[in-house]
Image (tube, rainbow, N blue to C red):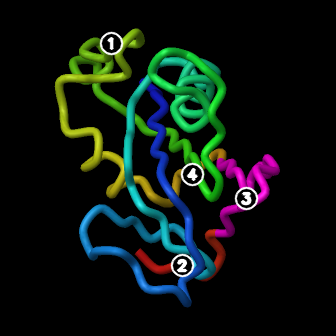
Amino acid sequence: MKAYIFINGMVIPKTLNKKNEADWIDLDEQFSYELCNYGISKKFENCKQGAIEDITKTPLGNLNIIPNSYIGIFEVDLDLEEYDSIDDNSFLADFDILEKVNKNKDKLIFSAMYDSKKNYVENFINQKNMEY
């Protein structure tokens, strides 16, 4: 059964130093991706909406686009027990979601970012020539 995992956080050029070595994920050769939040959904559109709202709205629902933020969405295959444990309202499940991301980095199906000027850019992650 298929499900969709989102990750989001801050994106910086690989040439700049990272704040710390923890909580980063390699997805391409151009950028470094800080991992700030993640979640899972049974439906792609629900996953996409939740990921985008996470980087564009405050906890109270007010618009607050975060410059240099990104989302990535991965398609993963799950067994029935894992699939049934997904709570689409909270974007949580009864298994290690980050472990699934690390095992399925090559299954990135969507990416988007807000650049430093808050321009929205879709599918900017280029995974060509990456080794996992």
Q: Nearer the viewer, mark 4 or mark 1?
A: 1
Residue drawn 56% across and 72% down?
A: 12
Secondary structure found at label 4: strand
Mark 4 crowd level (few <14, some 14–19, many ≥20, 10 Å Cα): many
Q: Nearer the viewer, mark 2 or mark 3?
A: 3
Q: Which mark is residue 108?
A: 4
Q: Nearer the viewer, mark 3 or mark 4?
A: 3
Q: Which residue is mark 2?
A: 130
N-term mark: 4 or 1: 1
N-term mark: 3 or 1: 1
Q: Which residue is mark 3?
A: 115
Residue drawn 66% across and 63% down?
A: 125
Q: CA distance from mark 3 to mark 1?
A: 31 Å
Residue 40 image point, x, y percent: 40, 28
Along the viewing direction, whichever of 59 and 24 lies nearer the viewer: 59
Secondary structure found at label 2: loop
Mark 2 crowd level (few <14, some 14–19, many ≥20, 10 Å Cα): few
